[in-house]
Amino acid sequence: MSASNSAQIHKNTQRLDQICATVPVIPVLTLDSPEQAIGIGKALVTGGLTVLEITLRSNYGLSAIKQLKKALPEAIIGAGTVLTPEQYDACVEAGADFIVSPGFTAELLHHGSRSAVPLLPGIASVSEAMQAMALGYRRFKLFPAAVVGGVDFLKAIGGPISDLKFCPTGGIKPTNAADYLALNNVMCVGGTWLTPTDAVQQGNWQAIEELAKQTCTLTSS
Ligand code: 3PG
């Protein structure tokens, strides 16, 4: 790792710490239209969840990042499900404040280590964490958290490798979020439960705002 990459990734770690300290939960969103994006985005931010992850799982994802960066200047907008350097660049161009990937390739990690927009790479094992650590990464998404051991995995990895911090996602719900948030190595959690399908289909943004408000009261158990 060159000296400049090492300085950049250190800065990116600090920026991720700031972002993840803002909220207990980052809603993971798949948005299909401008109406949906603004309805859901406004509801979540008004409800107090000011950090959003907009995935590239829908065709509208990239445009939604652009739209909400303009419409909700008080929000921090991340791009999720970023799989390639090309997608990374497109999200930066769209205005994303941070980038999330479900896993990583060497190419993606190298790209993230040179970017001023921080990458939160996904890992699912200790060896993956070690590979990314070799490039300077210290902050990770644990994905799919519940499948790979959840709270037990995080407790176990905190023994041998204590300077890592995680945003676990995948299987986190209101019923188990506090167990994750109680761990020293968890910064915040992510999940899709803030946008239940029926509320989204009915355009019931008020229900989503209420859910966000309840979620903001979540602390460690
Ligand atoms: C993610 O990309 O983080 C997950 O799809 C979130 O998983 P969940 O639907 O179990 O919250």
Image (spheres, grey):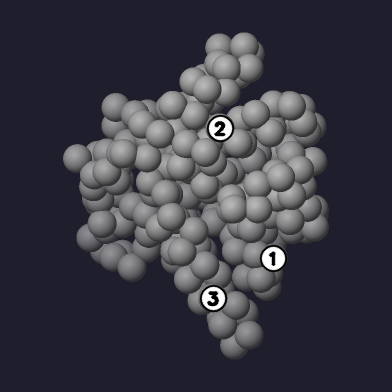
Alpha-carbon neighbours of circle 3 within 10 Å: few (<14), some, or many (≥20)? some
Quarter placement of the C terminus = top left
SS type, badge 2: helix
Give me the C-alpha separation between circle 2 and circle 1. 33 Å
Q: Which mark is residue 111?
A: 1
Q: Residue 11 carries which label?
A: 3
Mark with earlier residue (2, 3): 3
Give me the C-alpha separation between circle 2 and circle 3. 31 Å
* Residue at (80, 57) in percent of width and height: 93
Alpha-carbon neighbours of circle 2 within 10 Å: few (<14), some, or many (≥20)? many
Residues at circles 3 and 1 in contact by the CB criterion of under 8 Å: no
Give me the C-alpha separation between circle 3 and circle 1. 15 Å
Name the residue tied to disc 2: 43
Horizontal and vertical percent position of residue 99: 62, 54
Mark whose residue sits in front, 2 or 3: 2
- As drawn, is 60 to the left or to the right of 210? right
